[in-house]
């Protein structure tokens, strides 16, 4: 470690260029620039090798919900690694952390969830979904119920099956995806529509696409519908109020499984334990990851309702699926302590009743900026739309890259938010103070001004 720490930021940048291929990156473009080297973090701030202090408005990648610098989580991992650093849950074995965490997850989720299948990430959780959903219908002697309906622009991970469930066109185009048996309907993105309908009408229309797709495929061919309660990586797409009740009605009516991808929305992001709780849906399966450990160690899983779990158990036969790190002991120990922090410090209530409404209030003031066409935020998950003109509504030419210009200005001014096209998204840690929220809004406003100057000048 000592030798490592003697390197300068510039040394790391060189080494990084020489040896490290980054995820979701244009490797040529990055090669011509330098990466930002993050060396440490505390609370809601990250620090780079040049000594810049940056407010992390994205909680890492939507995961560091309890904030950085949590000794409790470090201690939980250390203690578990001393006691039992690794053992698997294969071959009829189990260890206390995976058992205890499974039981805790049952306590915080809706009553139909009594079981969990552990994985190491969100992508692995969604690969598990594809396998488990098909296994379920096979066991019920309906193997023709094979097709899973998902949505365009959804993000469900980057492994082959998870990327297929996802609706990211560039990902599909690069790898010959989706795999067979996965189809996509439109997302309930009202601001991105022609806005000729009211949001409520539009929400109904988008939900009815699910029904039309089921009828087109034949209800006896459809296994499940998967969706994020609020699409995250797709640009924090908050569905109109009419959307989820209608989707639930359709899933119930046709008997298809409802899968709520809770990788971002799980564990408090919307001010409830899960996004399904916020929207009042009753899912059959809930993939999770990210916030379960606040990102301190990799861990994911699928919460399995009795509808599915009982069939797996009653019908029997080996389910040929699992990961070396399914329920890693240290990951589970950290997750348990993370859940205890959420409970002890009432952080989910804080998102719902305190910092959530406080940040939302500031965020919606950004809508007064001439560059902003819409602001939206639920709990601590928000977005704003950069537009060329508000009246009449005109969006920028995508090639202009206005979102990226704004994002880069934000980072240069000490605030991480993410650009999804011309949509700027935000998801800060739950421990954000009012002062830090004010700082976030002030910096956002400043950077909207700077973005305006940059594109005019
Ligand atoms: C991040 C994400 C995933 C994938 O999780 P990984 O841990 O990166 O594999 C899946 N679903 C949603 C909704 C996500 O945001």
Image (spheres, grey):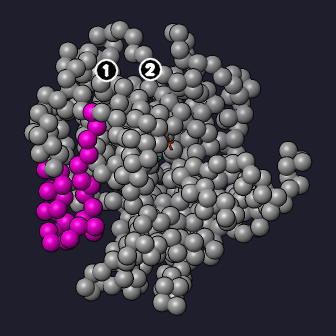
Q: Nearer the viewer, residue 437 or 31?
A: 31
Query: Residue drawn at (11%, 45%), measured in percent from left and top?
Result: 212
Q: Nearer the viewer, residue 39 or 304?
A: 39
- The image position of residue 283, as x and y in percent, is 28, 37
Compared with 311, 132 (above or below) is below
Label 2 residue SS: loop
**Which mark, residue 367?**
none
Instruction: Classify mark 2 as within 8 Å of ligand 1 or not, answering yes or no.
Output: no
- The image position of residue 45, as x and y in percent, is 65, 62
**Which mark, residue 135?**
1
Marks 1 & 2, CB-CB < 8 Å contact: yes
- In the picture provided, is 7 more to the left or to the right than 347? right
When asked about the image quadrant of residue 12, the answer is: bottom right
The residue indicated by pointer 2 is 321
Label 1 neighbourhood size at 10 Å, few (<14), some (14-19), many (20+)? Answer: many
When asked about the image quadrant of residue 27, the answer is: bottom right
Query: Residue drawn at (52%, 75%), measured in percent from left and top?
Result: 405
Label 1 residue SS: helix
Give the Cα separation between the discs numbered 1 and 2. Answer: 10 Å
What range of the chain is rendered magenta? 181-208
Compared with 319, 237 (above or below) is below
């Amino acid at each position: 470690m000592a030798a490592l720490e003697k390197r300068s930021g510039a040394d790391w940048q060189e080494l990084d260029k020489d040896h490290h291929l980054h995820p979701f990156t244009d490797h040529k473009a990055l090669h011509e620039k330098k990466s930002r080297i993050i060396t440490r973090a505390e609370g809601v701030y990250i620090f780079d090798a040049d000594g810049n202090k940056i407010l992390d408005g994205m909680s890492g990648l939507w995961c560091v919900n309890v904030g950085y610098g949590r000794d409790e989580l470090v201690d939980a991992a250390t203690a578990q690694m001393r006691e039992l650093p690794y053992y698997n849950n294969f071959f009829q074995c189990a260890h206390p952390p995976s058992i205890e965490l499974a039981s805790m997850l049952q306590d915080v989720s809706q009553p139909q969830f009594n079981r969990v299948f552990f994985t190491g990430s969100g992508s692995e959780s969604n690969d598990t979904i594809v396998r488990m959903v098909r296994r379920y219908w096979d066991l019920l002697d309906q193997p023709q119920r094979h097709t899973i309906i998902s949505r365009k622009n959804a993000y469900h991970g980057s492994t082959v099956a998870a990327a297929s469930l996802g609706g990211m066109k560039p990902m599909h185009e690069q790898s010959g995806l989706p795999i067979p048996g996965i189809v996509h309907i439109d997302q309930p993105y009202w601001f991105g529509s022609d806005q000729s309908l009211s949001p409520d009408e539009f929400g109904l229309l988008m939900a009815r696409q699910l029904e039309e797709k089921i009828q087109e495929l034949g209800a006896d061919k459809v296994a499940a519908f998967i969706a994020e309660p609020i699409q995250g990586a797709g640009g924090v797409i908050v569905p109109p109020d009419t959307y989820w009740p209608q989707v639930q009605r359709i899933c119930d009516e046709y008997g298809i499984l409802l899968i709520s991808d809770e990788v971002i929305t799980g564990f408090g992001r919307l001010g409830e334990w899960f996004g399904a709780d916020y929207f009042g849906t009753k899912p059959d399966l809930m993939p999770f990851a990210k916030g379960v450990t606040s990102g301190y160690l990799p861990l994911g899983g699928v919460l399995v309702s009795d509808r599915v779990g009982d069939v797996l158990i009653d019908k029997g036969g080996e389910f040929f699926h699992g990961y070396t790190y399914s329920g890693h002991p240290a990951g589970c120990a950290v997750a348990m302590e993370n859940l205890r922090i959420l409970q002890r410090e009432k952080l989910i209530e804080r998102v719902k009743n305190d910092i959530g409404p406080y940040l939302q209030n500031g965020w919606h003031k950004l809508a007064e900026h001439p560059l902003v066409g819409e602001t939206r935020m639920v709990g601590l998950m928000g977005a704003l739309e950069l537009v060329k003109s508000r009246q009449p509504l005109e969006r920028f030419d995508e090639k202009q890259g206005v979102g990226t210009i704004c994002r880069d200005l934000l980072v240069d001014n000490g605030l991480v938010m993410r650009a999804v096209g011309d949509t700027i998204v935000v998801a800060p840690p739950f421990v954000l103070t009012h002062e830090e929220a004010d700082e976030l809004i002030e910096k956002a406003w400043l950077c909207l001004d700077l973005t305006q100057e940059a594109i005019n000048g």
